[in-house]
Amino acid sequence: MNMPSNDIVTVDLGDRSYDIYVGADLLQQAGELIANAVPGARMAIITDNNVGPLHLETLTSSLDRKRIDWISIEVPAGEKTKCFDQFNQVVEQVLAARLERGDAIVALGGGVVGDLAGFVAGVIRRGMKFIQIPTSLLAQVDSSVGGKTGINSPHGKNLIGVFHQPELVLADTTVLNTLSQREFRAGYAEVAKYGLIDRPDFFDWLESNWPEIEAGGPARAEAIAESCRAKAAVVAADEREHGCRALLNLGHTFGHALEAATKYDGSRLVHGEGVAIGMVLAYKFSNRLNLAGAEAAERVVRHLKTVGLPTSISEIPGDIPPAETLLEYIAQDKKVTRGELNFILTKGIGRSFIADNVPTSQVLSFLKEEHPS
Ligand SMILES: NC(=O)c1ccc[n+]([C@@H]2O[C@H](COP(=O)([O-])OP(=O)(O)OC[C@H]3O[C@@H](n4cnc5c(N)ncnc54)[C@H](O)[C@@H]3O)[C@@H](O)[C@H]2O)c1
Ligand SMILES: [Zn+2]
C-alpha cells in the first residue's frame, strides 16, 4: 500500500473542520499547537489517575513555555467514571475556575476521559472549546475522532451525550509506550476494523506490518494515521450517523452483547477484545448466510490470533449467559431500528455493508452454534 508521509489528517466538516496530528513526542509540542488552534484560551485538563502521573507534566511544561494558563482535574481511571457523579464534579471544578466559553477543555487520556471531557465541553456555557490528546491506541484511532461524547446510564452505555467536535486532536505515538500490552492489542482491533470494513489493501498491509506496529516503529504512526483518515472520511460523509457511519459498528453488535454479558468487567473482557470476537462472529455469520466465503472469516481469525486477541466466545473467562440472553442484549443495543435487527455484514475482506431486517431466528441459531456450552 502506498502510505502518504503526511502526518496531519483533516476532518472535513466545513467551518468546524479540524486537524489530527499523528507523530512521536507531540506532547512536548502541545503548547505551540494549542496556542495556534485556540489563541488566548485558558485550559482545564481532564486526565485520569493512570495517565496523569505519567504524562501530565510533559503537557503542562509545554503549556507553561507558551504561557498558557491551565488547571488540571484528575478522575479515577475506568469505565465507571463515565457517570453523572463524575460529570458533575468536573463541571463544578471548571466553573469554579471561571473558565469561559472561549476557553478549552483538554482531554488527556483514553476514551473514558475523552468521552467525559467532551461531554463537559459540549454543555458548559452551551459549548466550550475542546481539545483531544488521546493516550490509548483505541482513543487515537477511534474515540477522539468524530465528536461523539457522553456518559453511561444504568440503562446502557453512552446513552447520555452530545455531538461536540474538537478544535484539535494530538495523537502522540510515544505515549503509547506506557500503555499495557493488553490495552494496546485491544485498541488494535479497531485498526483492523477499518481494513475489514472497506479497505482490503489496508488489511493486507496490517497483516504484514503488525510486528512493527506493536514494536513502535514508523508503521505504528502510519497505521494510526491511516485509521484516522478512514474514520475522518466516514465522519465527514455522515457526521450524525444517519447512514454510512453505522459501518463503523462492524463487530460491535456482537461485541456489545458480550460486554453486557460480562457486566462490563474489564478483567474478563475489554471493549476491543469484544470487538475482535464480534468481527469474527460478523464474518462467520455472513458466511452462514451465504454472503461471504468461509476463507474470509478464517483469515480474520488468523490475523487476530497473531495479534494475541480472542476470536471466540469460549475464550472469555467465566460463564456466559445462554444464546437467548445474548440475543436480548443485541436487541437492547442502540443499533436496533424499530425492532428490526440491523447488522453490519460482509461479502468478504473489506466488503462490509449495512444489513437491515436480519431475522432474529437466524441470529439465535447462529449464537447457539457459537456458544461454548
Ligand atoms: N466517542 C466515541 O466515538 C467512542 C468510540 C469508541 C469508544 N469510545 C469509548 O471509549 C472508552 C474506551 O476507551 P479506552 O479503551 O481508551 O479506555 P480507557 O480510557 O479506560 O483506557 C484504558 C486504560 O488504559 C489507561 N491508559 C490510557 N492511556 C494510557 C497510557 N498512555 N499509559 C498508561 N495507561 C494508559 C487508562 O487509565 C485505562 O486504565 C469506552 O468508554 C468507549 O465507550 C468512544
Ligand atoms: Zn469500538
Image (cartoon, rainbow, N blue to C red):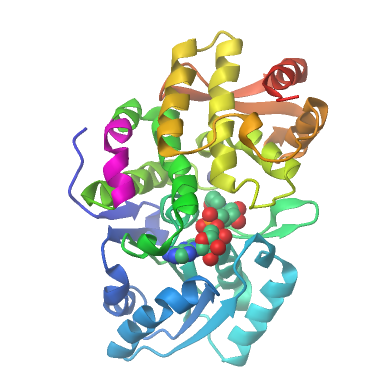
Residue pictured at 61% horizontal, 73% vertical: 126
In this view, the residue in front, 313 or 292, is: 313
- Picture quarter containing residue 160? bottom right
Asked whether 247 or 107 is in front, the reply is 107
Q: Residue 58 placed where, x, y %?
A: 35, 79
Which residue is depicted at the point 38% across and 60% down?
A: 176
Is 94 placed above or below 331 here? below
Horizontal side of residue 190 vs 35, given as left or right: right
Q: Quadrant location of residue 94?
A: bottom right
Q: Residue furthest top?
A: 290
Q: Quadrant of the C terminus?
A: top right
Q: Nearer the viewer, residue 139 or 269?
A: 269
The answer to if 209 sits in the magenta stretch is yes
Please provide percent x and percent y for residue 285: 60, 18
Query: Which residue is painted at 60% across and 40% down in the image?
Result: 274
108 vs 245: above or below:
below
Q: Which residues are magenta?
A: 205-215
- On the image, the x and y values in percent for residue 299 come to 42, 21
Question: Is residue 357 among the parts visible in the rendering?
Answer: yes
